[in-house]
């Protein structure tokens, strides 16, 4: 049974440069089966961006005049808000501006990462504590060597049962 990050991680990691546009990010996740990508700056992982981050940013960009309570609700339910955006042509300027921003503008929190030798129990604890769905596996230089998703850990549990 796997006990370390190295044994569970996906080794072929799709990444995106911090200077790439959000539109580039959207295209990259559209081309792959991944919903989130590690963000690199000078070859080192500096964050992780998910499709939900884009949806939350879209909700915020398209509702600048909304009361904060409504914006919070929109950000939590951003995918439903996309339908409103699709119907609101006047908001196309905000959407275009958002898509032109660099991916680094969506990196809101510190990267949740681990070393390849990290025990899976510690990876699980980090995911629960930080409320994230992915942990980036990095080497001593900060280069991405793998990624562990919540689904990877579910696979480990399935194999143990």
Image: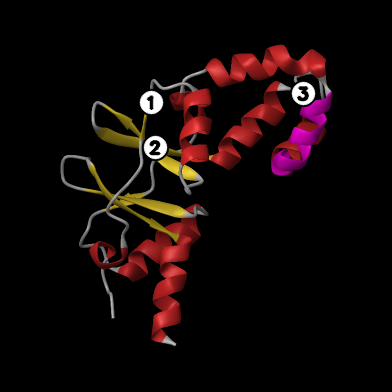
Label 1 or label 2, whichever comes before in sequence order = 1
- Residue 149 has which mark? none
Label 2 or label 3, whichever comes before in sequence order = 2
Q: Which residues are magenta?
A: 76-87
Residue furthest front as drawn? 31
Q: Is residue 21 above or below residue 84?
A: above
Indicate the quadrant containing the N terminus: top left, top right, bottom left or bottom right. bottom left
How busy is the neighbourhood of tag 1: few (under 14 within 10 Å), some, or many (20 plus)? many
Q: Position of residue 43 (x, y in %)?
A: 23, 31
Q: Position of residue 2 (x, y in %)?
A: 28, 75
How busy is the neighbourhood of tag 2: few (under 14 within 10 Å), some, or many (20 plus)? many
Real-space Cα separation, disc 2 to disc 3, in angstroms:
26 Å
Kindly state the secondary structure of the residue where label 2 is placed.
strand
In the image, 5: left or right of 24? left
Read off the residue under disc 3: 63
- Residue 47 has which mark? 2
Read off the residue under disc 1: 18
In the image, 127: left or right of 65? left
Q: Residue at x 27, y 74 (%)?
A: 3
Indicate the quadrant containing the C terminus: top left, top right, bottom left or bottom right. bottom left
């Amino acid at each position: 049974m796997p006990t370390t990050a190295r044994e569970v991680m996906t080794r072929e990691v799709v990444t995106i440069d911090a200077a790439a546009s959000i539109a580039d990010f959207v295209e990259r996740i559209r081309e792959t089966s991944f919903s989130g990508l590690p963000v690199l700056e000078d070859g080192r992982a500096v964050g992780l961006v998910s499709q939900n981050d884009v949806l939350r940013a879209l909700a915020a960009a398209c509702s600048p005049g909304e009361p904060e309570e409504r914006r919070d609700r929109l950000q939590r339910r951003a995918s439903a808000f996309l339908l409103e955006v699709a119907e609101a042509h006047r908001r196309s300027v905000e959407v275009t501006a958002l898509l032109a921003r660099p991916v680094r503008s969506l990196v809101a929190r510190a990267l949740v990462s681990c070393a390849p030798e990290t025990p899976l129990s510690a990876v699980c604890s980090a995911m629960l504590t930080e409320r994230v769905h992915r942990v980036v596996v990095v080497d001593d230089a900060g280069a991405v060597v793998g990624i562990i998703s919540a689904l990877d850990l579910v696979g480990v549990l399935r194999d143990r049962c």
